[in-house]
Image (spheres, rainbow, N blue to C red):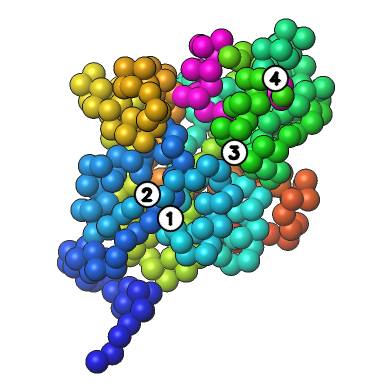
Amino acid sequence: MTTFSRRQALGLMGATAAAAGLGAPALAQRGKVVVGALPFTSHSGSFVALQRGYFEEAGLDVELKFFQAAQPMAVAIASGDVDFGVTAISGGLISLADKGAVKVIGGALSEEPGIDGQKILASNAAFEAGLTSPAALGEARYGMTTAGSSFHYMGSKIAAAEGVAPTFVPLQKVGAIIGALKSGQIDAWSIVPHIAKPLAGAGAVKMIGNVSDYLPDYQVTTVFTSTGNASSERELTSAFLGGFSRGVADYNAAMVDRSAGEEAMDEMVRLIHTYVYTDRPLEKAAPSIVNGSMRLNADAALNVASVRDQLDWFQSENLVDADITLETLVDSSYVETIGS
């Protein structure tokens, strides 16, 4: 009897079988599909797809694995511990793509005109000392997880637009950055609104600007997978994107467009609360979840113009190899691309 590996078995599945409805049962025999996530509202596409059975209907037995930063998730996908991830582009992810380990296959969170997006924050102490707008960031200590993170990219682009040069302080985890900002150990940071607004509302920090004023079409997070999945397990990858996109559609309708009605929004908030602000009762978490809603890309469409800008910045800062191309980082064959 011949035994096939997971990759060999999936490689034998043809488009004809998938079109005939045979793909889902075959994929179901694959075992667990591990999806990386952060406990943020911006990862709701995965949460909704799992909770409402969209992954299961696509033939996938999905398990979520949570991380505290983008870089460890990228490493986990490269090593095969995680199959798919949703997170920001980082220097580490680009370097792994250059080594042939990972590929960006779609878009997730985006800045969009007219939707309240990521906020630029100042510590109370820094605000009282004059850091009342991004133009005053020149002497600031700006928080980031690691060099080459999305926080580093955002802060640098904001600073460049204002002609200033803050000092970037690596603190590894989002929780550590929040603690340092509240205590005045750092002066500034930028983060998604469901984190920024509650901090400011509680008087712990001050909001001094919007990221969208500097990066209006920023592709904040992307969907990515291993290069092996992208190139050799197309049915699996398409199934994941299909389930994820259904989750995104529900989220946008309920939380961003508000077209699904108040009851649908309340139900969505309860679902998201299963993963986000779990240390708070629902009634206290709900306002932060509602006020922090940002657009997730319909059908995982990818803004490649924004991705290209990010790659150019990482290269200009010598954080990744200068010879890496957009095609090295992105497999554009799965979703619609914007700005290409």
Magenta-highlighted residues: 186-203
Q: Residues within 10 Å of mark 2 (few under 14, many from 20)?
A: some
Mark 1 touches mark 3? (CB < 8 Å): no
Is residue 322 found left or right of 329 in the rendered image? right
- Using the image, tell me which numbered label, if any, was put on residue 84: 1
User: Image quadrant of residue 250?
Assistant: top left
Mark 1 touches mark 4? (CB < 8 Å): no
Q: Residues within 10 Å of mark 3 (few under 14, many from 20)?
A: some
Picture mark count: 4
Q: Which residue is mark 2?
A: 64
Rendering coords of residue 316 (x, y %): 77, 47
Q: Amino acid at mark 4?
A: Gly
First of labels 1, 4 by sequence position: 1
Q: Amino acid at mark 1?
A: Phe
Q: CA distance from mark 2 to mark 1?
A: 10 Å
Question: Does dot 4 land on a helix, a strand or a loop?
Answer: loop
Mark 2 touches mark 3? (CB < 8 Å): no
Look at 66% across and 50% down and name the residue there.
91
- Using the image, tell me which numbered label, if any, was put on residue 184: 4
Q: Nearer the viewer, mark 2 or mark 1?
A: 2
Taking depth in this image into account, of 307 and 180 the one nearest to the observer is 180
Rendering coords of residue 209 (x, y %): 63, 17
